[in-house]
Protein backbone atom coordinates (compact mmCIF):
# COMPACT_ATOMS: atom_id res chain seq x y z
CA UNK A 1 0.00 0.00 0.00
CA UNK A 2 2.80 2.37 0.96
CA UNK A 3 4.64 1.62 -2.29
CA UNK A 4 1.51 2.31 -4.31
CA UNK A 5 1.07 5.70 -2.62
CA UNK A 6 4.75 6.51 -3.11
CA UNK A 7 4.62 5.56 -6.79
CA UNK A 8 1.52 7.68 -7.30
CA UNK A 9 3.30 10.62 -5.62
CA UNK A 10 6.33 10.21 -7.91
CA UNK A 11 4.08 10.07 -10.96
CA UNK A 12 2.37 13.32 -9.90
CA UNK A 13 5.77 14.98 -9.32
CA UNK A 14 7.02 13.87 -12.76
CA UNK A 15 3.85 15.10 -14.45
CA UNK A 16 4.23 18.45 -12.66
CA UNK A 17 7.88 18.74 -13.72
CA UNK A 18 7.04 17.89 -17.32
CA UNK A 19 4.19 20.41 -17.30
CA UNK A 20 6.48 23.07 -15.83
CA UNK A 21 9.20 22.42 -18.43
CA UNK A 22 6.63 22.47 -21.22
CA UNK A 23 5.17 25.75 -19.94
CA UNK A 24 8.60 27.33 -19.63
CA UNK A 25 9.58 26.22 -23.12
CA UNK A 26 6.36 27.44 -24.74
CA UNK A 27 6.40 30.76 -22.86
CA UNK A 28 10.09 31.27 -23.63
CA UNK A 29 9.50 30.57 -27.34
CA UNK A 30 12.90 29.01 -27.72
CA UNK A 31 12.45 28.30 -31.41
CA UNK A 32 11.47 31.92 -32.11
CA UNK A 33 14.71 33.26 -30.62
CA UNK A 34 17.87 33.80 -32.62
CA UNK A 35 21.43 34.94 -32.40
CA UNK A 36 22.15 38.04 -34.50
CA UNK A 37 24.25 41.19 -34.77
CA UNK A 38 22.58 44.59 -34.90
CA UNK A 39 24.25 47.71 -36.31
CA UNK A 40 23.85 51.00 -38.15
CA UNK A 41 25.54 51.99 -41.41
CA UNK A 42 25.24 54.60 -44.16
CA UNK A 43 26.10 55.16 -47.78
CA UNK A 44 29.58 56.61 -48.36
CA UNK A 45 28.36 59.93 -49.74
CA UNK A 46 25.96 60.51 -46.86
CA UNK A 47 26.91 62.53 -43.77
CA UNK A 48 24.66 62.09 -40.75
CA UNK A 49 24.79 62.41 -36.96
CA UNK A 50 22.84 59.76 -35.09
CA UNK A 51 21.03 61.27 -32.09
CA UNK A 52 18.70 58.51 -30.93
CA UNK A 53 18.07 54.92 -31.90
CA UNK A 54 16.15 52.16 -30.20
CA UNK A 55 15.32 48.70 -31.49
CA UNK A 56 12.42 46.84 -29.90
CA UNK A 57 11.63 43.15 -29.62
CA UNK A 58 8.50 41.70 -28.07
CA UNK A 59 10.17 41.64 -24.64
CA UNK A 60 13.20 43.94 -24.80
CA UNK A 61 14.80 47.04 -26.34
CA UNK A 62 18.36 47.92 -27.40
CA UNK A 63 20.32 51.08 -28.22
CA UNK A 64 23.16 50.82 -30.76
CA UNK A 65 25.83 53.43 -29.89
CA UNK A 66 27.76 54.31 -33.08
CA UNK A 67 28.55 53.29 -36.62
CA UNK A 68 30.60 50.16 -37.25
CA UNK A 69 29.81 48.87 -33.76
CA UNK A 70 28.26 45.41 -34.02
CA UNK A 71 26.16 44.42 -31.03
CA UNK A 72 25.79 40.67 -30.82
CA UNK A 73 22.72 39.13 -29.22
CA UNK A 74 22.01 35.51 -28.38
CA UNK A 75 18.57 33.94 -28.03
CA UNK A 76 16.61 37.12 -28.72
CA UNK A 77 13.43 37.69 -30.65
CA UNK A 78 13.86 39.43 -33.99
CA UNK A 79 13.34 43.23 -33.76
CA UNK A 80 9.80 44.33 -34.55
CA UNK A 81 9.85 48.10 -33.92
CA UNK A 82 12.35 50.90 -34.42
CA UNK A 83 12.85 54.50 -33.31
CA UNK A 84 15.44 56.67 -35.07
CA UNK A 85 16.35 60.35 -34.83
CA UNK A 86 19.22 61.77 -36.88
CA UNK A 87 20.62 64.93 -38.45
CA UNK A 88 21.49 64.83 -42.16
CA UNK A 89 24.36 67.18 -42.97
CA UNK A 90 23.88 66.82 -46.72
CA UNK A 91 20.53 68.60 -46.64
CA UNK A 92 20.83 70.26 -43.20
CA UNK A 93 17.71 68.69 -41.68
CA UNK A 94 16.54 66.50 -38.79
CA UNK A 95 14.58 63.30 -39.49
CA UNK A 96 12.69 60.90 -37.25
CA UNK A 97 11.14 57.46 -37.68
CA UNK A 98 9.07 55.62 -35.09
CA UNK A 99 7.29 52.57 -36.41
CA UNK A 100 7.01 48.84 -36.99
CA UNK A 101 9.49 46.58 -38.74
CA UNK A 102 8.37 43.58 -40.87
CA UNK A 103 8.91 40.97 -38.15
CA UNK A 104 7.76 38.00 -40.23
CA UNK A 105 10.06 38.91 -43.13
CA UNK A 106 13.03 39.30 -40.79
CA UNK A 107 12.32 36.00 -39.07
CA UNK A 108 11.95 34.25 -42.42
CA UNK A 109 15.47 35.34 -43.45
CA UNK A 110 17.08 34.27 -40.17
CA UNK A 111 19.26 31.16 -40.03
CA UNK A 112 22.22 30.18 -37.84
CA UNK A 113 24.38 33.35 -38.02
CA UNK A 114 22.41 36.54 -38.69
CA UNK A 115 22.89 40.28 -39.10
CA UNK A 116 20.37 43.10 -39.03
CA UNK A 117 21.52 46.43 -40.49
CA UNK A 118 19.91 49.84 -40.76
CA UNK A 119 21.60 51.69 -43.64
CA UNK A 120 20.96 55.40 -44.18
CA UNK A 121 20.58 56.81 -47.69
CA UNK A 122 19.80 60.18 -49.19
CA UNK A 123 17.57 62.66 -47.43
CA UNK A 124 15.08 60.88 -45.14
CA UNK A 125 15.46 57.30 -46.41
CA UNK A 126 16.98 54.19 -44.86
CA UNK A 127 17.01 50.49 -45.63
CA UNK A 128 16.45 47.43 -43.48
CA UNK A 129 19.01 44.80 -44.51
CA UNK A 130 18.96 41.26 -43.13
CA UNK A 131 21.85 38.92 -43.93
CA UNK A 132 22.92 41.24 -46.79
CA UNK A 133 19.42 41.21 -48.31
CA UNK A 134 17.40 44.43 -48.48
CA UNK A 135 14.06 43.65 -46.85
CA UNK A 136 12.41 47.07 -47.02
CA UNK A 137 13.10 50.77 -47.60
CA UNK A 138 11.61 53.34 -45.24
CA UNK A 139 11.01 57.08 -45.27
CA UNK A 140 11.21 59.17 -42.13
CA UNK A 141 9.53 62.48 -41.35
CA UNK A 142 11.29 65.83 -41.20
CA UNK A 143 11.17 67.26 -37.68
CA UNK A 144 12.20 70.45 -35.92
CA UNK A 145 14.82 69.92 -33.23
CA UNK A 146 17.28 72.18 -31.38
CA UNK A 147 20.87 72.04 -32.61
CA UNK A 148 22.63 69.39 -30.51
CA UNK A 149 26.23 70.62 -30.41
CA UNK A 150 26.80 73.60 -28.13
CA UNK A 151 30.48 73.89 -29.12
CA UNK A 152 30.09 74.14 -32.90
CA UNK A 153 27.78 76.31 -34.96
CA UNK A 154 25.42 74.39 -37.19
CA UNK A 155 26.53 76.24 -40.33
CA UNK A 156 30.18 75.43 -39.61
CA UNK A 157 29.47 71.75 -38.92
CA UNK A 158 27.40 71.37 -42.10
CA UNK A 159 30.17 73.01 -44.14
CA UNK A 160 32.92 70.72 -42.83
CA UNK A 161 30.78 67.62 -43.31
CA UNK A 162 30.06 68.39 -46.96
CA UNK A 163 33.20 70.07 -48.26
CA UNK A 164 35.72 68.20 -50.43
CA UNK A 165 38.73 70.41 -49.68
CA UNK A 166 41.99 68.55 -49.09
CA UNK A 167 45.26 69.62 -47.49
CA UNK A 168 48.77 68.46 -48.36
CA UNK A 169 50.89 69.09 -45.24
CA UNK A 170 54.40 70.49 -45.80
CA UNK A 171 57.12 70.79 -43.14
CA UNK A 172 59.71 73.52 -43.59
CA UNK A 173 62.66 72.93 -41.24
CA UNK A 174 65.66 75.27 -41.19
CA UNK A 175 67.66 73.29 -38.64
CA UNK A 176 69.12 69.80 -38.83
CA UNK A 177 66.37 68.35 -36.66
CA UNK A 178 64.74 65.12 -37.76
CA UNK A 179 61.05 64.22 -37.84
CA UNK A 180 60.12 61.45 -35.39
CA UNK A 181 56.38 61.42 -36.03
CA UNK A 182 53.47 63.66 -36.91
CA UNK A 183 49.70 63.48 -36.53
CA UNK A 184 46.90 65.36 -38.26
CA UNK A 185 43.42 65.33 -36.77
CA UNK A 186 40.18 66.75 -38.03
CA UNK A 187 38.40 67.94 -34.91
CA UNK A 188 36.23 70.48 -36.76
CA UNK A 189 33.11 68.30 -36.78
CA UNK A 190 33.69 66.51 -40.06
CA UNK A 191 31.19 63.68 -39.66
CA UNK A 192 31.57 62.42 -43.20
CA UNK A 193 32.20 58.68 -43.25
CA UNK A 194 34.54 56.96 -45.67
CA UNK A 195 37.41 59.39 -45.01
CA UNK A 196 39.89 59.00 -42.20
CA UNK A 197 39.82 61.86 -39.72
CA UNK A 198 43.22 61.13 -38.21
CA UNK A 199 46.55 60.48 -39.92
CA UNK A 200 50.04 59.71 -38.69
CA UNK A 201 53.36 59.94 -40.46
CA UNK A 202 56.93 59.22 -39.40
CA UNK A 203 58.81 60.31 -42.52
CA UNK A 204 58.96 63.12 -45.05
CA UNK A 205 60.02 63.31 -48.67
CA UNK A 206 60.75 66.65 -50.32
CA UNK A 207 59.23 68.33 -47.24
CA UNK A 208 55.96 66.40 -47.60
CA UNK A 209 54.71 63.81 -45.14
CA UNK A 210 54.51 60.15 -46.12
CA UNK A 211 51.50 58.05 -45.12
CA UNK A 212 51.10 54.43 -46.18
CA UNK A 213 53.90 54.84 -48.79
CA UNK A 214 52.14 57.81 -50.40
CA UNK A 215 52.24 61.58 -50.08
CA UNK A 216 49.84 62.41 -47.26
CA UNK A 217 46.65 64.36 -47.96
CA UNK A 218 44.00 65.08 -45.34
CA UNK A 219 40.62 66.68 -44.98
CA UNK A 220 40.59 70.05 -43.25
CA UNK A 221 42.89 69.11 -40.37
CA UNK A 222 42.85 71.65 -37.57
CA UNK A 223 44.95 69.91 -34.92
CA UNK A 224 48.57 68.96 -35.57
CA UNK A 225 51.05 67.11 -33.38
CA UNK A 226 54.75 66.94 -34.25
CA UNK A 227 57.73 65.34 -32.62
CA UNK A 228 61.24 66.28 -33.76
CA UNK A 229 64.61 64.98 -32.70
CA UNK A 230 65.95 68.41 -31.91
CA UNK A 231 69.51 69.20 -32.98
CA UNK A 232 69.81 72.27 -30.74
CA UNK A 233 69.40 70.55 -27.38
CA UNK A 234 70.98 67.44 -25.91
CA UNK A 235 70.79 65.60 -22.61
CA UNK A 236 73.40 63.41 -21.01
CA UNK A 237 72.86 59.78 -20.01
CA UNK A 238 76.00 58.48 -18.34
CA UNK A 239 78.83 59.51 -20.66
CA UNK A 240 76.63 59.75 -23.79
CA UNK A 241 74.87 62.80 -25.21
CA UNK A 242 71.44 62.36 -26.82
CA UNK A 243 69.24 64.75 -28.76
CA UNK A 244 66.06 65.79 -26.99
CA UNK A 245 62.74 65.30 -28.77
CA UNK A 246 60.62 68.42 -29.01
CA UNK A 247 56.86 67.80 -29.09
CA UNK A 248 54.50 70.34 -30.66
CA UNK A 249 50.75 70.61 -30.27
CA UNK A 250 49.44 73.05 -32.85
CA UNK A 251 45.77 73.98 -32.77
CA UNK A 252 44.31 75.85 -35.75
CA UNK A 253 41.36 78.14 -35.05
CA UNK A 254 38.52 76.20 -36.72
CA UNK A 255 36.27 79.27 -37.13
CA UNK A 256 39.09 81.20 -38.82
CA UNK A 257 39.78 78.17 -41.00
CA UNK A 258 36.08 77.93 -41.87
CA UNK A 259 35.94 81.60 -42.93
CA UNK A 260 38.95 81.15 -45.20
CA UNK A 261 37.73 77.95 -46.83
CA UNK A 262 34.17 79.15 -47.31
CA UNK A 263 35.29 82.37 -48.99
CA UNK A 264 37.67 80.70 -51.46
CA UNK A 265 36.65 78.19 -54.12
CA UNK A 266 39.91 76.22 -54.23
CA UNK A 267 39.65 72.51 -53.46
CA UNK A 268 43.33 71.81 -52.69
CA UNK A 269 45.82 73.60 -50.46
CA UNK A 270 49.30 73.06 -49.11
CA UNK A 271 49.27 73.23 -45.32
CA UNK A 272 52.68 74.75 -44.59
CA UNK A 273 54.19 74.32 -41.13
CA UNK A 274 57.11 76.74 -40.94
CA UNK A 275 59.78 76.39 -38.24
CA UNK A 276 62.60 78.84 -37.49
CA UNK A 277 66.27 78.05 -36.88
CA UNK A 278 65.53 77.02 -33.27
CA UNK A 279 62.62 74.80 -34.36
CA UNK A 280 59.97 77.10 -32.95
CA UNK A 281 56.77 77.38 -35.00
CA UNK A 282 57.10 80.56 -37.03
CA UNK A 283 53.76 80.27 -38.87
CA UNK A 284 51.22 77.90 -40.36
CA UNK A 285 49.58 78.86 -43.63
CA UNK A 286 47.49 77.59 -46.51
CA UNK A 287 48.77 78.17 -50.02
CA UNK A 288 48.31 77.19 -53.63
CA UNK A 289 49.10 78.87 -56.94
CA UNK A 290 46.55 81.61 -56.30
CA UNK A 291 46.29 82.13 -52.55
CA UNK A 292 48.28 82.33 -49.36
CA UNK A 293 46.57 82.60 -45.97
CA UNK A 294 48.23 82.81 -42.58
CA UNK A 295 46.24 80.83 -40.02
CA UNK A 296 45.49 81.71 -36.43
CA UNK A 297 47.19 79.06 -34.32
CA UNK A 298 47.95 78.15 -30.75
CA UNK A 299 51.12 76.16 -30.06
CA UNK A 300 52.21 74.26 -26.97
CA UNK A 301 55.72 72.79 -26.61
CA UNK A 302 57.05 70.03 -24.44
CA UNK A 303 60.13 67.85 -24.25
CA UNK A 304 59.92 64.12 -24.64
Image: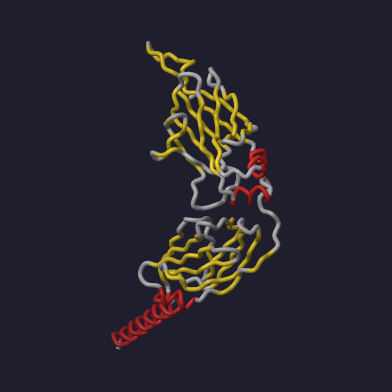
User: Is 100 in front, or is 172?
Assistant: 172
Image mark count: 0
Answer with the quarter of the image where residue 112 lies: bottom left
Write the residue at 39% across / 78% down: 21
Which residue sits furthest top?
239
x, y (%) of residue 16?
39, 82
Q: Is residue 243 left or right of residue 89?
A: left
User: Is 139 in front, or is 5?
Assistant: 139
Write the residue at 50% across / 49% down: 195
User: Is 229 in front, or is 46?
Assistant: 46
Answer with the quarter of the image where residue 202 lies: top left
x, y (%) of residue 296?
65, 32
Q: How is the image coloured?
A: secondary structure
Write the residue at 67% across / 41% down: 259
x, y (%) of residue 162?
59, 52
* Residue 136 versus residue 63 in the image, above or below: below
x, y (%) of residue 174?
51, 20
* Residue 99 versus residue 65 in the image, above or below: below
Quadrant in which the N terminus appears: bottom left
Write the residue at 46% across / 38% down: 216
Amino acid sequence: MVNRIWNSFLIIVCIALIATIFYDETSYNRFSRFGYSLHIDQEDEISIKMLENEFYTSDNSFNIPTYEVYWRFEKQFAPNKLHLLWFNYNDNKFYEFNGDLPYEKIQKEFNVDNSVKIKFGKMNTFQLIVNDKTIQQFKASEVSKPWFDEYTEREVAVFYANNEITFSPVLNIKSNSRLVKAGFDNTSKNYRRGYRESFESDSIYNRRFIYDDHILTTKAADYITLELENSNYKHKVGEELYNDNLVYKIEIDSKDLYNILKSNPSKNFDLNINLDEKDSVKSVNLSNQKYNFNLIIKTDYSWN
